[in-house]
Amino acid sequence: MSYDLFLKPKSGDLSKQQFDSYFQGRDRYNLEGSQAWYQNDATGVYFVFEYQESEDDEPDYYPIAFNMNYFRPTYFVKEAESEVIDFISKFDLEVDDPQTNGMGSGDFNVDKFRGGWLHGNEFGYQSILKDHPEVFCLPTKKLEDCWAWNKNKESQQEHVTDDVFVPSIILLNYEGRAVTACVWPDAIPSIIPPVDILLIGRKELAPRKLFKKVEDMAIGGWDSVKPILEKHKVRMEGDAYYLYYQSVPIEIKKYIKTLKAFDISSLERLSFDQVLNEELVKKYVA
């Protein structure tokens, strides 16, 4: 199940060479034959533009098709819309949108694009969850906060000193449920976003066993970590805690050393498209 949008120039032609040249010059696109695949590894969002050769005497020829799957987290359309807008603006395109609640034929309308995909996406939830109700999900706000953080992480890292770490937010299957997580190795200076759990690699801060430090991994739940972050933050970066120090504060060291070692092989990394909007899942799972 997917959303399909067809595009053509308002005047003139759009050649395959122009198509290839445009997408070769854009980040996160990979050209495969007639298709330009978008894949953002940081956010998990993906979709495709395809160049369609004209059949002889085809009356209403739209050379470009855009396709994005349904049954996905709703932030997929937020990331896609800017890419669609840029492409349409570059070549002055009009669209044909056959979706229910779509924009029909004519000028592109971003609100109707978003609304049409969201309508079809919800139908996808309804159809698929009927037979396959066992899915991972998180509240929409948490998913969209995770998406926004990862989307901006690279630029945020560029604007802080090199010795302050900006982690990605990842999604994990932890004790049978989806959780947000990020790494905080040895409590190094970092900008820590709100997550369900922190994965704390312990090397310098590893507890001693038989008079030796044994490198391991521990988990810090957000409720127990947050008061420490609050106390030792330099400032807030939105909802994230900016931690900067020359050496790890004693209180943080003590806290991390008290945590139990955790076998991370029991954790399953979830792809972003596996974790769906909780509100929609609840709506369609009896």
Image: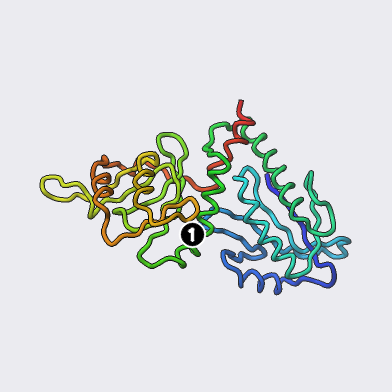
**Residue located 86% across and 60% down the image:** 60
Vertical relation: 265 (above or below) 8: above
Vertical relation: 18 (above or below) 263: below
Q: Position of residue 184 (x, y in %)?
A: 35, 52
Q: Which residue is mark 1?
A: 153
**Residue located 56% across and 64% down the image:** 28
Three-letter code, disc 1 = Lys
Looking at the rendering, in which quadrant would you find the N terminus?
top right
Q: Is residue 262 left or right of residue 180?
A: left
**Residue located 53% across and 44% down the image:** 142
Q: Is residue 6 left or right of residue 131?
A: right
Q: Position of residue 263 (x, y in %)?
A: 30, 42
Q: Is residue 37 left or right of residue 99?
A: left
Viewer-proximal residue among 97 and 139? 139
Viewer-proximal residue among 50 and 200? 200
The residue tagged with tag 1: helix, strand or loop?
helix
Q: Position of residue 59 (x, y in %)?
A: 88, 61
Q: Is residue 157 left or right of residue 244?
A: right
Q: Place residue 224 in its image quadrant.
A: top left
